[in-house]
Image (spheres, helix red, strand yellow):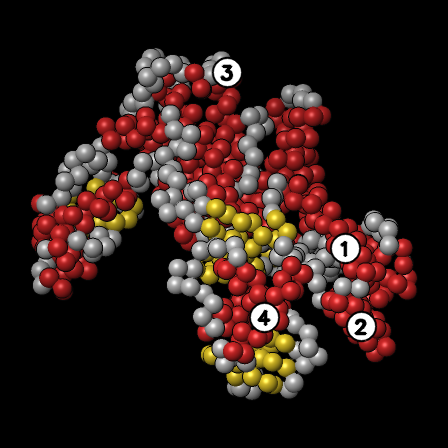
Amino acid sequence: MNATQEQLKDKLKQALGKAFGDEYIDIDPILVPASNPKFGDYQANMALSLAKKLGQKPRDIAHLVVDHLDVSDICETPEIAGPGFINLRLTSSYLEAQLNSIQTDSRLGVPVSSHPKREIVDFSSPNIAKEMHVGHLRSTIIGDAIARILEFRGHDVLRLNHVGDWGTQFGMLITYLREVSPSALTTANALDIGDLVNFYKQAKKRFDEDEDFQERARQEVVKLQAGAEDTVHAWKLLCEQSRQEFQIIYDLLDIKVEERGESFYNPFLPAVVEDLNQAGLLEENQGAKVVFLEGFKNREGEPLPLIVQKSDGGYNYATTDLAALRYRIQQDKAKRLIYVTDAGQASHFAGFFQVANRANWIPEDVEIVHVTFGLVLGEDGKKFKTRSGDTVRLRDLLDEAVARAREDLKSRLTQEEVREETEEFIANVAKVVGISAVKYADLSQNRTGNYKFSFDKMLALKGNTAPYMLYAYARTQSISRKGNIDYENLGENVKINLQEEAEFTLAKHLLQLDEVIAEVEQELLPNRLCEYLYQLSEKFNQFFESCPVLKSEEPTRTSRLALCDLSARTLKLGLFLLGIDVLERM
C-alpha cells in the first residue's frame, strides 16, 4: 500500500500540471499533516510559493488546482482556507478500506523498499581491554534501531562492530602483563575483565612516565604487526576475553553485530598511503605523511593536517578508517555507509570523508552518513559519572535499571493491586521493563542533542516512556483475556466500521505508520518512531476509555476488537524496530 500522503502528493502534482502546464507537474505541493484536526487531515501549501512565479493571487491558484484535482477516492471535497491553503479530509470509506486492508497484512501496510540496497551500519565500537561504559550506550542502541528499521524495509544490512583491537595500547598492555601477570598472555581467562582494565590503566601510566617501558611497548607493537607468534597469541587471548564481556552486554540488550575490528584492515593500510600519494594528495610534514584538509585550520590559523602515516612509519585511526571506507565500498559493495558515533568525533569524520572524496574513492551512487549523537548527562546537567567521578559502567547501569524496575513492580503488586505473581514472572517483567526503559529514554530523544539520564523519569508509567508503551500493549491483551478473545480468529470477513471520534482519531494514526518508517529510513532519527508510538498509545487509551469494546453489540464489538488488535500489532512492531520486547501482562 502506498502511503496516503504520497498518493495525495501525486494527485496534487497531476492537478498542477493540468492547471498550469507540464512544467509544473514536478512542483512540490508542500503537503503536510494538518496542524489542527478541525482543518482536516492534510494541508497543501504550494499556492503561496507559486504566487510570484505565476503572477496570480495564492487563493486563485488554489482554486485552479482544486478545479483540476480528483481525490474523490480518498478525500471529501477539498476546502480552501485563508490565503490559499488546500485542506483535505480523508473519507470514512477510505479509512475503513485501508484499515481492513492492513488487518490481514503482517507488515501492517509498510511496503518493502522498491529500491533495496546494501547498507552498512557501523555502531557500538568498544575498545579491547576496556569495559563498555555509558558512552557506548547511545551508539549501540541507536545503531541497532537504525539497522532494524532498514532491515524491515528490505535492505541488505551489514551490522559492523569496528572494535579498537589494534595499535599502541596492545604494546603497552602486553609489555606490562609480561611483568606482572605473564599467565594472562598464555592462558585463557586468567584475569577477569576488571583486573584487565586496571592493568591497562597502570600500563598507560608506565608508558607516559617511563621511557624504557615506552620503547619496549613500541617494540611489542612491531612484533605484533610482524606476526610474532607469542605476541599474536597474547593479543588473541586479550581480544577474546574482552569479546566475552561485550557479548554479555549485547545479549542483555538483544544486539546482533558482526565484529570487524581495526586489525582486519591492517593489511590494507600501505595501499591507502600509496594511492593517496599517487593521487597527489600526500605531503611531508615533520617527518609524517599527511593530507592538508580544506576548510580546517588549527589555532594558529594554519591548514590542519590529517596524518596518514606517522614519522615512525606507523599508522593511526584515520588510515584505518580510510581503509575501512574503501573496503566497504569496493568489497562489501555498500551503497550507504552509516557511522554511528558521538558528535565529538564530527571533525575526524569530516576530515577523512573529505580525503576519500578528493581521492575519488566515493562513487556518485554511494552515500556516506555520520549519524552523530550528544552526551548522556546526569540530572545535574553535567556529564554522567559515578559519585567517585568515574565513567559509569554500562553493565552497572543496566543492572540498576532492572533492579529498580523490580522494586517498582513489587511495590505495585503489594500496595496497589494486591496480587501474587511467581518469581519467574517478576524477574521477566523487571528485566523487560528495566532494559526497555533505558533504551527508550535514549531513543526518544533527538539523538543530535544531549539528554539527562533519570531512572525515575524513564521508569514512570505515565508520559513518553517505555513502561507507558508496554502498559498500552498489555491493556490490549487484557481485553482478549477478559473476553476470552483470540485476535487471530475474530471470524471471516471482519470489517472495521468507524463511528465515534476516538475511533477516527486512532484509525488515522494507525495508517501513518508507513510514512513514519519511511521518514526514519531516510533521516535516521529513531525519535520520530518513538513519538509516533507515544501518540498511538495515547490515542488508543482515549479510544479504550470512550468506546466500550466487550460490552458493545455486534457488529460494533468485533469492529472495535479489530481496532484493538491493529493497535497492539502496531505497537509491537514499532517497539520491535526500536529493539524493545512487549509484555502480555505487567
The circle drawn on residue 271 is 4
Q: Earlier in the sequence, mark 3 or mark 4?
A: 4
Q: Earlier in the sequence, mark 2 or mark 1?
A: 2
Q: Earlier in the sequence, mark 3 or mark 1?
A: 1
Badge 3 marks a residue whose secondary structure is: helix
Compute the Cα span from label 4 to label 2.
23 Å
Residue at numbered disc 3: 482
Label 2 Cα crowd, 10 Å radius (few <14 / some 14-19 / many 20+): some
Q: Position of residue 14 (x, y in %)?
A: 16, 48
Residue at numbered disc 1: 236
Residue 399 visible in the displayed image: yes
Q: Position of residue 523 (x, y in %)?
A: 42, 53
Q: Residue at x 18, y 47 (%)?
A: 12
Direction from residue 238 to residue 573 in the image, left or right: left
- Are circles 2 and 1 on residues that touch, CB within 8 Å? no
Label 4 Cα crowd, 10 Å radius (few <14 / some 14-19 / many 20+): few
**Type of amino acid at the residue the image marks with label 3:** Lys
